[in-house]
Image: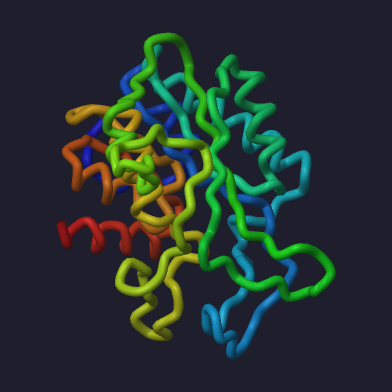
Amino acid sequence: MQLNKIHNADCIQILKNEIEKESVQLIFADPPYNLSGNGLKSTGSTTGGDFNMVNEDWDKMEEQEFIEFTNDWVASCKEVLKPNGSIFIACSYHNMGESIMSLKLNGFEIKNIITWNKSNAMPNLTRRVLTHTTEFVIWAVKGKGWIFNYDVLKELNPEKKKDGTHKQMRDIWTMPLCQGKERLRDETTNKALHPTQKPEELLKRIILGFSNEGDLVLDPFGGSGTTPFIAKKYGRDYIAIEREKKYADAIEMRLSQI
């Protein structure tokens, strides 16, 4: 299929019918967390401004439907991944269980679960639980010989040894939620265009650390386009799939800026 293109379509259909088997080196997936519908919102927050919890139709499923959906797209990803390929799945504690079980059922080996510690996490609105400051990224491999650019990850690591030299990358990554110029905005309302935009720094570490120049990177849930944006910036080919046209159009616009 055509590379370096945004495909405005259902990811499972594209994965099953259009992408060459065992052609993809690296997959980053930020799937629905199945959290929508609680209606929580904040007005006038001094830390992050007005915001609403995610409340999108594509993020609402019954539990059994969500389990089957997760297993279906994970299985489809395995088919297109190279024998030594890696898959990264963004999740929270809400959908981590489904993601892990689908990976295991499809023969993946989990190597790390990265904890994303949000340095500017939104406040807790209910005042009945601890403030949620973390999300997770599961790293799993299909077979042997996976790419792990150890020295590159050491250079990317903001933490240094006492003498200032590079330090091994750990599995806790502290970085803020998208903000400022990096955050895509709706031109009409000036609100965040996509509710779950991932930071460029997160994808930079994954793409540079677990693929090489010229490799093919796939994002089955394109969203705001951070994966193809970073892939293009650092000399990787990409395939991004996004079902919602307004987001697919936004990705095209974002990529045109490189």
The residue depicted at 80 percent of the width and 74 percent of the height is 127
Q: Is residue 162 visible?
A: yes
Classify 238 as above or below 59: above
Q: Is residue 83 above or below residue 101?
A: above
Q: Residue furthest bottom?
A: 44
Q: Left or right of 38: which side holds 179?
A: left
Q: Is residue 66 left or right of residue 171?
A: right
Q: Nearer the viewer, residue 186 or 61?
A: 186
| Position of residue 114 measured from the top left corner of the image (x, y, whole percent) | 54, 39
Q: Residue furthest top?
A: 144
Where is residue 102 drawn, in percent x and y?
A: 65, 27
Number of marks present in the image shown: 0
The residue lying at 66 percent from left, 78 percent from top is: 41
Q: Quadrant of the C terminus?
A: bottom left
Write the residue at 71% across / 36% down: 97
Task: Residue at 70%, 46% (x, y): give it.
Answer: 93
Residue 8 shows in this picture: no
Q: Nearer the viewer, residue 145 or 7?
A: 145
Quadrant in which the N terminus appears: top left
Q: Is residue 62 left or right of residue 25?
A: right
Residue 201 placement (x, y as % from top left):
35, 51
> Compared to 59, does 40 lie above or below?
below
Q: Quadrant of residue 110?
A: top right
Expressed as whole percent of the image width and height from the top left, the position of residue 129 reads 80, 64
